[in-house]
């Protein structure tokens, strides 16, 4: 019930609606321009789909290869069964090296494990360096979008947060604000003993962690400190280096409408004896946290192929109105609603399968051709349904199967229409009528008109 | 990889066109700059016009292409310890990618990991004949090496952010300018 209220609250927030409308339209507009100038678009999607589908059946093989390659270069590869294990591993590595304050690159995996909260509780001091995450950290919030964390904040919100934090006079000019944050974080980069990042892909063949960003912070976080820790979901594995080609081209074009992000960083080990610089220690933590359960589920496993471009959020008639927060889960939108059923500690997260109009817009644009709305519909069908719903659907099925009952029903509905508000008082019906207006039925049904105009009825 | 693999081959790109032209236009569309020079002396001359030295030292990577240009420049050189304070970082790109206006850098003993990020201006020198149509072509070349360098990066334009109401701001944490130099001959 509370998730429902969260959605209702966001939906009623007209300021949020305005910000979302502008941002989503812009993201989709840029994407459409890239699609139009990429004649090989569908071929790229075919390739991306095939590459990611391969991962569903070869995960163990890829993980073993990835680990072998990275360890051969002196990196440490760890397994984390769940969020707590991952946070514990990271805390242990940081503590053993006496690290307290350190820089972080944007990472949804660390949002998923709530790493910052765990580290702060242990007395550590993580500093987010992506501007969006920096803003989200300043207001003690959570990201509202997988690629644009601060999409829910206006420039005035950003101005207040940044100026207050830095003790500067108020401005809401995005350029001035961004440069102030650049200045503030430059010294953090230069003195940080450790850097934590996520990964966009992990290449099995070469043992390579791939990170994309526009700001340059991921490169600094992974290059300057003496210790680099990357938290990588096991869904990020791809077989070959060359597979990055179609995946990266699709990722940027879908996410931000860029042809490629500014920086694509490929890290295949810690600093070697012959290297000029780079961290002496590289730890890669491979995170399960429900992913293997999703992979074992024939209905949902396809969602593991997601590359987190966020286009299913941008195009979603629901997400694009309310943003990511009411979902109450790290990954919002259609694909997030599938992931939540396996990754979320909240048993109520399965309810998210019902927060979807099944319009299928997401399936049409998904770069890896995930049938997201089909999956959500299938997940709904196997969920335990409340008695009122089962009774109602059973009755409806009985009526629809009998023409005479159906005709009687349409007449009854017409008579009952003036009393429709009474339905709002009955709890199981209220869930349906709240926020929906029962349309006034026409004075004649289609069948009646059909007969009237001389059509024949077939029984 | 095992033999049951049904992984796709590279996706061909329709109409690659004249690579230097495509590259220059693509880089310009992401606020980067590019010029083509016949030799190192000419390139250095054009570079000095584009980036007048302001007295701060320049970082010059220990790679042939960067050094070739660097020796024609009337600037003080710094090593990697001075990266945070220098004006320009002069690096050597292994490949340039026409389709997206991207330069690909190997980061190793002769080119430190942070060199392209800390200075205000990043100049990447690339041989004109190392221009490739797409990222996939560069990845195939990279994969042909016996071993990958522990770090490499593909750079597409100067650093940027759009986290405040989607307004694009340049720079974010990296350089304010990216200049690609296509060199026909050293």
Image (tube, coloured by chain):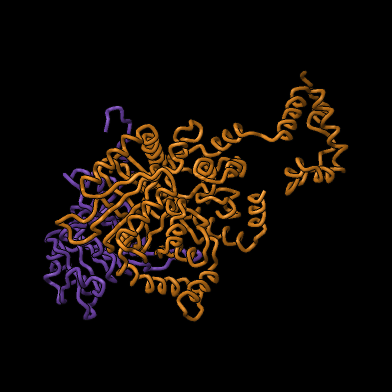
Chain colours: A orange, B purple
Label tally: 0
The picture quadrant where one finds residue A195 is: bottom left
- Along the line of sight, the residue nearer the viewer: B88 or A203: A203
Q: Is residue B144 visible?
A: yes
Of residue A414 and residue B41, the one placed in the foreground of this image is: A414
Image height check: is A110 above or below A295?
A: below
**Would you say A23 lies left or right of B169 here?**
right
Q: What residue sits 75% from the left and 32% below the top?
A: A392
Q: Which quadrant is home to the C terminus of chain A? A: top right
Q: Where is residue B32 in the image (x, y as percent from the top left)?
A: 32, 64
The relative height of residue A152 versus residue A184 in the rendered view (above or below) is: above
Q: Where is residue B175 in the image (x, y as percent from the top left)?
A: 31, 68
Q: Tell me the residue at 69%/35% (across/down).
A: A386
Instruction: Classify A233 as above or below A399.
Output: below
* Residue B148 position in % (x across, y down): 20, 48
Q: Is there any visible trace of residue A356 in the rendered image? A: no
Residue sitting at x 34%, y 62%: A216
x then y, percent, for residue A334: 54, 44
Q: Residue at x 33, y 69 (%)?
A: B176
């Amino acid at each position: 019930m509370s998730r429902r209220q969260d959605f209702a609250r966001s939906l009623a927030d007209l300021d949020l609606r305005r910000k979302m409308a502008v941002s989503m339209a812009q993201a989709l507009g840029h994407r459409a321009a890239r699609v139009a100038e990429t004649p090989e678009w569908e071929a790229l999607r075919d390739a991306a789909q095939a590459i990611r589908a391969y991962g569903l059946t070869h995960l163990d093989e890829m993980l073993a290869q990835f680990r072998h390659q990275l360890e051969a270069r002196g990196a440490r590869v760890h397994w984390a069964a769940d969020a707590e294990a991952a946070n514990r591993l990271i805390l242990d590595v940081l503590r053993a090296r006496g690290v307290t304050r350190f820089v972080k690159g944007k990472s949804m995996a660390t949002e998923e494990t709530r790493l910052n909260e765990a580290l702060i509780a242990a007395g550590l001091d993580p500093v987010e360096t992506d501007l969006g995450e920096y803003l989200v950290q300043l207001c003690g919030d959570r990201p509202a979008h997988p690629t644009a964390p601060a999409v829910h904040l206006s420039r005035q919100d950003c101005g207040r947060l940044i100026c207050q934090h830095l003790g500067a006079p108020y401005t809401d000019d995005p350029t001035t604000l961004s440069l102030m944050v650049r200045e503030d974080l430059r010294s953090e980069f230069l003195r940080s003993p450790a850097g934590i990042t996520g990964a966009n892909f992990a290449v099995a063949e070469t043992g390579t962690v791939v990170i994309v960003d526009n700001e340059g912070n991921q490169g600094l976080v992974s290059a300057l400190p003496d210790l680099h820790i990357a938290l990588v979901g096991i869904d990020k594995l791809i077989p070959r280096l060359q597979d990055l080609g179609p995946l990266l081209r699709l990722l940027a074009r879908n996410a931000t409408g860029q042809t490629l992000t500014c920086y694509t960083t490929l890290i295949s080990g810690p600093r070697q004896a012959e290297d000029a610089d780079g961290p002496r220690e590289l730890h890669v933590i491979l995170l399960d946290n429900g992913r293997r359960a999703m992979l074992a589920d024939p209905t949902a496993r396809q969602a593991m192929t997601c590359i987190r471009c966020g286009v299913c959020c941008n195009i979603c008639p629901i997400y694009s109105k309310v943003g990511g927060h009411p979902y109450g889960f790290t990954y919002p939108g259609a694909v997030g609603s599938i992931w939540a059923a396996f990754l979320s500690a909240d048993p109520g997260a399965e309810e998210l399968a019902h927060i979807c109009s099944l319009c299928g817009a997401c399936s049409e644009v998904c770069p890896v051709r995930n049938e997201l709305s089909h999956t959500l519909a299938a997940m709904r069908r196997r969920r335990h349904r409340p008695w009122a719903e089962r009774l109602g659907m059973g009755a409806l099925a009985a009526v629809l199967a009998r023409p005479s009952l159906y005709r009687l029903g349409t007449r009854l509905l017409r008579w009952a229409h003036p009393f429709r508000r009474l339905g709002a008082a009955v709890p199981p019906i209220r869930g349906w009528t709240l926020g929906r207006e029962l349309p006034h039925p026409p004075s004649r049904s289609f069948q009646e008109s059909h007969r009237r105009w001389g059509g024949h009825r077939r029984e | 990889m095992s033999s049951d693999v049904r992984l796709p081959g590279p996706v061909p790109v329709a109409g690659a066109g004249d690579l230097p032209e495509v590259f220059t236009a693509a880089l310009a569309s992401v606020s980067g700059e590019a010029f083509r020079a016949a030799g190192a002396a000419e390139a250095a001359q054009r570079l000095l016009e584009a980036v007048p030295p302001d007295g701060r030292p320049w970082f010059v990577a220990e790679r042939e292409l960067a050094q070739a240009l660097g020796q024609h420049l009337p600037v003080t050189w710094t090593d990697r310890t001075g990266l945070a304070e220098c004006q320009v970082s002069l690096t050597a790109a292994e490949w340039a990618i026409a389709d997206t206006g991207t330069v690909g850098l190997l980061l190793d003993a002769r080119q430190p990991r942070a060199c392209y990020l800390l200075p205000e201006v990043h100049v990447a020198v690339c041989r004109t004949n190392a221009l490739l149509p797409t990222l996939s072509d560069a990845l195939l070349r990279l994969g042909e090496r016996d071993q990958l360098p522990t770090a490499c990066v593909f750079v597409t334009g100067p650093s940027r952010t759009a986290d405040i109401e989607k307004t694009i701001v340049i720079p974010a944490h990296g350089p304010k300018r990216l200049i690609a130099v296509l060199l026909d001959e050293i």
